[in-house]
Image (tube, grey):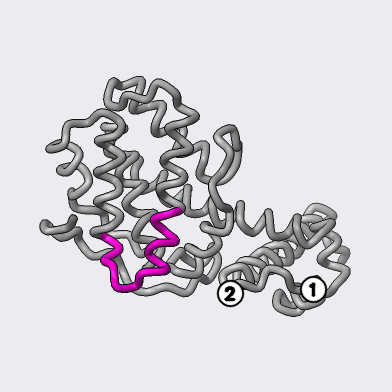
């Protein structure tokens, strides 16, 4: 008995999705290893797919790497959205996202390196974490929690701080990642107009238990370490 056409099409679509995901994961692993200039043949071998399969999904190696970075950023952003969904104060949403992203660099160094490879985004970028950061800043401004006369410049400052913090933590393994992330968060909150005492309080609140090293079965197999520890009351 012939297989129904709909089932056959679904099976082909699932196979194509698996192939694309394998290529993206292979590219992410190579980016994390600092080997983004490998031949396409090596990419397909790492993904365990045929050379022809590559061109069914991507026209160039650069297209694949762009997709790999966007995938990593979107997945991390989705995690931040999920964790922050129960908060009413947009200032706390912003702080939570920045603090968790700061801790990511130690708990999940492979994913961190992929995120850092994106560099500082343009203020008008419509992909990756930029729209989420802009959304959180705008929400805090509308609620009267932040003062940011120029939202584009505010976004550049936040993006630059996040990027530099990540690279700093990779370069300085002796520094406490939680304390550093919380201090930078406090400084940003004060820059946005929060009083010093409130900025410190928000940036030192207990964090939800999130295993940044275990993204789950549907996400890339990042290599990382452990769960988040509670922030120290002596941080900063």
Residue at image location 17% in from the left, 58% down from the top: 235
The picture quadrant where one finds residue 50 is bottom right
Give the side of residue 58 with respect to residue 155, left or right.
right
Closer to the camera in the image, 23 or 174? 174
User: Mark number for residue 39?
Assistant: 1
Q: Pointer 1: residues within 10 angstroms few (<14), some, or many (20+)?
A: few
Secondary structure at numbered mark 2: loop
Q: Distance between the residues labelled 1 and 2?
A: 15 Å
User: Mark number for residue 33?
Assistant: 2
Secondary structure at numbered mark 1: loop
Residue 214 at x, y percent in the picture: 42, 68
Closer to the camera in the image, 161 or 55? 161
The picture quadrant where one finds residue 178 is bottom left
Residue 170 at x, y percent in the picture: 42, 68
Q: In which quadrant will I find the C terminus?
A: bottom left
Characterize the magenta stretch by its predominant secondary structure: helix
Give the side of residue 202 with respect to residue 136, left or right.
left
Q: Earlier in the sequence, mark 1 or mark 2?
A: 2
Residue at image location 19% in from the left, 58% down from the top: 231
Give the side of residue 146 with respect to residue 112, left or right.
left
Residue at image location 56% in from the left, 43% down from the top: 121
Residue 94 at x, y percent in the picture: 34, 39
* Region rendered in magenta: 164-178
Residue at image location 47% in from the left, 48% down from the top: 78
């Amino acid at each position: 008995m012939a297989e129904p056409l709909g089932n056959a099409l679904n099976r082909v679509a699932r196979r194509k999705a698996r192939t694309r995901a394998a290529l993206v994961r292979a590219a992410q692993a190579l980016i994390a290893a600092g080997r983004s200039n490998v031949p396409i043949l090596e990419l397909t071998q790492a993904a365990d797919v045929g050379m022809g399969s590559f061109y069914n999904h991507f026209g160039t190696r650069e297209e694949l790497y762009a997709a790999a970075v966007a995938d990593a950023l979107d997945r991390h952003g989705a995690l931040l959205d999920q964790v922050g969904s129960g908060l009413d104060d947009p200032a706390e949403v912003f702080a939570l996202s920045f603090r968790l992203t700061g801790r990511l660099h130690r708990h999940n160094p492979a994913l961190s390196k992929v995120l850092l490879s994106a560099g500082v985004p343009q203020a008008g970028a419509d992909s990756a974490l930029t729209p989420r950061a802009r959304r959180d800043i705008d929400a805090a401004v509308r609620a009267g929690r932040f003062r940011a006369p120029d939202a584009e410049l505010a976004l550049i400052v936040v993006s630059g701080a996040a990027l530099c913090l990540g690279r700093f933590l990779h370069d300085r393994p002796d520094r406490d990642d939680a304390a550093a992330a919380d201090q930078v968060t406090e400084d940003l909150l004060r820059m946005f107009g929060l009083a010093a005492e409130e900025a410190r309080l928000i940036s030192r609140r207990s964090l939800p238990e999130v295993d940044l090293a275990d993204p789950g079965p549907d996400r890339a197999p990042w290599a990382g370490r452990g769960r988040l520890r509670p922030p120290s009351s002596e941080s900063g």
